Image: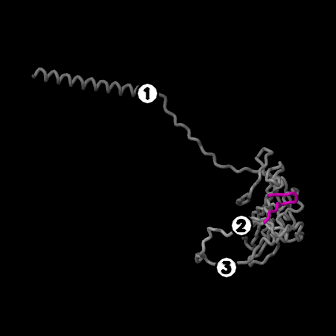
Amino acid sequence: MRTLRRISRNRAFAHVRILTAVLLVMAAAALVFLAVSPPATAQPTARIQPPTPKFSTAVAFDVSPAVRDLPPAARPLTYPPDTIVEPRERGLEGPKAHRVKPYRADGALQPFSPAPSIPVPSLTFEGLSNLDNFNLFGFRINPPDPDGEVGRNHYVELINIVFAVYDKQGNRLTGPTKIGDVWTGFAIPDCTDPSGDPVVLYDKMEDRWVLSQFTTRGMNPNGTFNGLPFYNCVAISQTGDPTGAYFRYAFITAQPGTNSTFFPDYPKYGQWRDS
């Protein structure tokens, strides 16, 4: 029995020595592998390029007469009183007219009037209406696309193809005026069209007014494009008085470096100092 126990103990010690030797060999091999392996290089991460502005040069520029001096507009064409016009759909003689659809109340309208939770305005006054479109053009406009901006001493309102200037007490100083009349005599006659989707901005840092509308001569009566260019027509007041003269610009809406134009459907503008 003592002999068998001694043999078993010797075999156990032999196994431990063999296992230790194997582990030492593996550790030495790992160290050799690390020593001869080239250092790992970090994979470069793709850097997101920040957006960069694209600059375009105006294709036309001049100075307008003062808005307060524009002559009253004549009404060129009268549609039947039950027609509404969508300005961007053009017919042979201008914006395309549609019969008024029957009115139907909104089924989702809630039949209650909760008490307002905001303070009442300090001043309200009647602005432009669809009747002003009818008086100037002989038709009404749908949709109205109202836009307005408050400056230091004035309020300027645009509704699709007419605009007016008010003082801070709500007194109308000019208008209603056709928006296209701002570009009367301009090198790009498209800017004088009643195309609509107007924008007005007030630059409070520079005390200037920005008026804009797009053009639609590049669109056929059926809504397809005919290859004529589209423009963004922009007017910037010379002073802080919106009834005065404006610097007038026309920017063609094309991909940079190409002749491919696109329809600038209701463009949006931002402003910053000197830009």
Q: Badge 3: few (under 14), some or many (20 or more) residues near its Cα, within 10 Å?
A: few
- Quadrant containing the N terminus is top left
Which SS class for mark 2?
loop
Identify which residue is drawn at 78% across, 51% down: 253
Residue 32 picture quarter: top left
Q: Give the residue type at disc 3.
A: Ser
Any magenta on residue 95?
yes
| Label number found at residue 122 | 3
Residue 267 position in % (x across, y down): 73, 57
Residue identified by numbered label 2: 204
| Depicted 71 relative to depicted 274: above or below | below
Q: Residues within 10 Å of mark 2 (few under 14, many from 20)?
A: some
Start and end of the magenta stretch? Answer: 89-99
Mark sitting on residue 35: 1
Identified by mark 2, the residue type is Lys
Residue 168, percent from left and from top: 74, 76
- The mark that comes first in sequence, 1 or 3, is 1
**On the image, which quarter does residue 235 sit in?**
bottom right
